Image: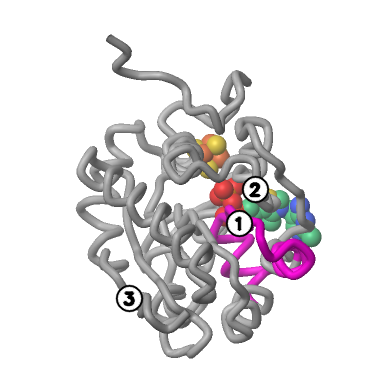
């Protein structure tokens, strides 16, 4: 009896994500979702700049690479040229919520029929753990060594809450990857986001609360506990916009 196999939508490449990094979990969930829907031959991912970029080595389907933050713009172009394909972006919080804020807001405002998988780990992971727009109040990072304070660095950006009022946005959910129950929910949300796109409904985004153990100065286990006890308080999980399936 086979109990565990590699998804067809993943290659055999060895991971370069750090041990315990949530990118490893989410990269696999995307592949499992694509296998579940049987859309591997018609899916195109868009990888960003940041640790999320490594995903293109691990996925066994077409993936384009975008300049930093321009990920939704590249996905928009691909989707408009190939409307029958399932097109998604896989972005960190530096890519999506800092340098790429304009791209994500305007893609959402236009109601582009793309899916976005948004990895919120609260820091710029690849470049060594600088503050991101999603860094928590008081959180120590390389650029906020005394902890983020409002006077100097403002408040965390809430992407789901920010995009929810836009009429072109049809589905928004915030999930996490710190427990088996949350991982199952995260996969369901990714599947739903692809289904929304296949049904032609409009823009959707799944925000995943993730970790960055080396830059948080924690072990993988401590970082998972931190997501549960701290991150989920600032970023409540849940559906921020439910799709209306008969609107298509
Ligand atoms: C135009 C441009 N500016 C800055 C950089 C440097 N840079 C590389 S990755 C990165 C931040 C990535 O952080 P995030 O999107 O949160 O992804 P993570 O690594 O945490 O997954 C930055 C600023 C770059 N590559 N290109
Ligand atoms: S630096 Fe952080 S985000 Fe990047 S692979 Fe390592 S743990 Fe993951």
Which is closer to the viewer, label 2 or label 3? 2
The crowd level at tag 3 (other Cα within 10 Å; few <14, some 14-19, many 20+) is: few
* Residue annotated with mark 1: 86
Tell which circle, 3 or 1, labels the residue nearer the N-terminal end.
1
Which is closer to the viewer, label 3 or label 1? 1
The crowd level at tag 1 (other Cα within 10 Å; few <14, some 14-19, many 20+) is: many
Q: Position of residue 243 (x, y in %)?
A: 37, 75
Q: Position of residue 94 (x, y in %)?
A: 60, 60
Q: Secondary structure at mark 2?
A: helix
The structure residue drawn at horizontal position 39% and vertical position 80%, both measured from the top left corner, is 161
Q: Are marks 1 and 2 in contact (CB under 8 Å)?
A: yes
C-alpha gap between disc 2 and disc 3? 25 Å
**60 in magenta:** no
Mark seen at residue 42: 2
Q: Secondary structure at mark 3?
A: loop
Residue 128 visible at all: no
Please report the bounds of the magenta region as a residue range: 74-101
* Residue annotated with mark 3: 242
Q: Quadrant of residue 20?
A: top left
C-alpha gap between disc 1 and disc 2? 6 Å
Q: Position of residue 117 (x, y in %)?
A: 51, 57
Foreground pick, 133 / 153: 133
For the N terminus, the quadrant is top left
Foreground pick, 143 / 183: 183
The structure residue drawn at horizontal position 37% and vertical position 54%, both measured from the top left corner, is 209
Picture layout, residue 29 above or below residue 155: above
Foreground pick, 213 / 115: 115
Residue 204 falls left or right of residue 126: left
Picture layout, residue 42 above or below residue 196: above
The crowd level at tag 2 (other Cα within 10 Å; few <14, some 14-19, many 20+) is: some
Residue 201 falls left or right of residue 239: right
């Amino acid at each position: 009896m086979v109990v565990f196999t590699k998804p067809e939508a993943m290659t055999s490449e060895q991971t370069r994500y750090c041990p315990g990094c949530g990118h490893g979990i989410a990269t696999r969930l995307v592949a499992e979702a694509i296998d579940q829907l049987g859309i591997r031959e018609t899916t195109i991912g868009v990888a960003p700049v940041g640790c999320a970029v490594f995903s293109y080595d691990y996925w066994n389907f077409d993936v384009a690479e975008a300049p930093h933050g321009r990920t939704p713009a590249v996905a928009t172009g691909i989707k408009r040229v190939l409307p029958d394909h399932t097109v998604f972006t896989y972005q960190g919080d530096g890519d999506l919520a800092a340098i790429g804020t304009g791209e994500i807001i305007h893609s959402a405002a236009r109601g582009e029929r793309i899916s976005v998988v948004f990895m919120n780990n609260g820091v710029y992971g690849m470049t060594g753990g600088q503050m991101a727009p999603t860094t928590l109040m008081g959180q120590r990072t390389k650029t906020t060594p005394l902890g983020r304070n409002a006077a100097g660095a403002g408040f965390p950006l809430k992407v789901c809450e920010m995009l929810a009022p836009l009429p072109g946005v049809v589905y928004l959910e915030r999930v996490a990857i710190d427990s088996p129950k949350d991982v199952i929910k995260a996969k369901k949300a990714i599947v739903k986001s692809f289904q929304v796109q296949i049904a032609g409904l409009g823009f959707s985004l799944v925000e995943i609360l993730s970790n960055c153990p080396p830059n948080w100065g924690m072990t993988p286990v401590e970082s998972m506990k931190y997501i549960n006890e701290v991150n989920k308080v600032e970023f409540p999980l849940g559906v921020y916009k439910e799709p209306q399936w008969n609107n298509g």
